[in-house]
Image (cartoon, rainbow, N blue to C red):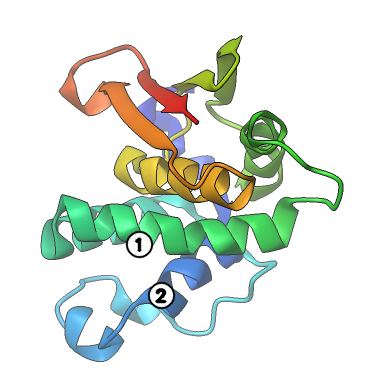
Amino acid sequence: MTPQDLSEVKMIGACINGIMSALLNRDLLLADFPRRPELAGIGNDEFRPISLYIDFCDYLEARLGTYAFLRLGRKMAATVMATSFPPGLYSVEAAIAHLQVAHQEFCRPLIGAFELTERSPGALVVRYTAPYNCTLQEGLFYEVAIRYGAPSAVVRHAACRRKGAEACRFEVDY
């Protein structure tokens, strides 16, 4: 599926709600977001057009700046983990690998992937092709690594689709 084919793709409401719940001064921050009325009353299990999620993320990243938006991704990670992560994940590697399972639950029809392509002691590489905002996902990788035992994790966004790469490449050292 190509980016122009996203009109049929839906995203679970919990992801939008996770971002909304992390925002301070929400009314002021979203006052000029053109699709603001569509954000009201979204159920966590309700699927909405992924274009709403993408537009919402693009708006927030432009409004907040990259660093603050990355921190918002860390807060959104709590929603992802609460919604999709089972008990019994005990390592950074298992938790990062589980993001693909979460993606399969959150995106319909499934498009793109969180592919764990390299594993070595204390280091993982993820090839990321899902349609979500990659800065937000960088924050997600940080928070997952921290919550699963790597308080000094470092995440590098080594390649980016928004800068012309075929896929985003995230390197997680822990």
Asked if marks 1 and 2 touch (Cβ < 8 Å), the reply is: yes
Query: How far apart in space, not on screen, are marks 1 and 2 (Cα)?
Result: 7 Å
Q: Is residue 30 above or below residue 115?
A: below
Residue 64: % across, % down: 16, 64
Where, by quadrant of the figure, is residue 119 drawn?
Answer: top right
Q: Is residue 55 visible?
A: no
Numbered circle sitting on residue 72? 1
Is residue 95 toward the left or the right of residue 77 in the image? right
Which residue is nearer to you in this view: 125 or 114? 125
Numbered circle sitting on residue 22? 2
Label 1 secondary element: helix
At 41% from the left and 75% from the top, the residue drawn is 22
Three-letter code for the amino acid on which mark 1 is drawn? Leu
Point out the tag, 1 or 2, that comes first from the N-terminus.
Answer: 2
Label 2 secondary element: helix
Q: Find the residue positioned furthest to the right.
A: 88
Which residue is nearer to you in this view: 155 or 43? 155
Q: Is residue 23 above or below residue 102?
A: below
Q: Is residue 69 above or below residue 162?
A: below
Q: Is residue 36 above or below residue 77?
A: below
Q: Find the residue positioned furthest to the front.
A: 152
Where, by quadrant of the figure, is residue 52 drawn?
Answer: bottom left
Residue 133: % across, % down: 35, 43
At 30% from the left and 77% from the top, the residue drawn is 36
Total number of numbered labels? Answer: 2
Is residue 155 toward the left or the right of residue 102 in the image? left
Is residue 30 toward the left or the right of residue 106 in the image? left
Q: Residues within 10 Å of mark 1 (few under 14, many from 20)?
A: many
Residue 54: % across, % down: 35, 50
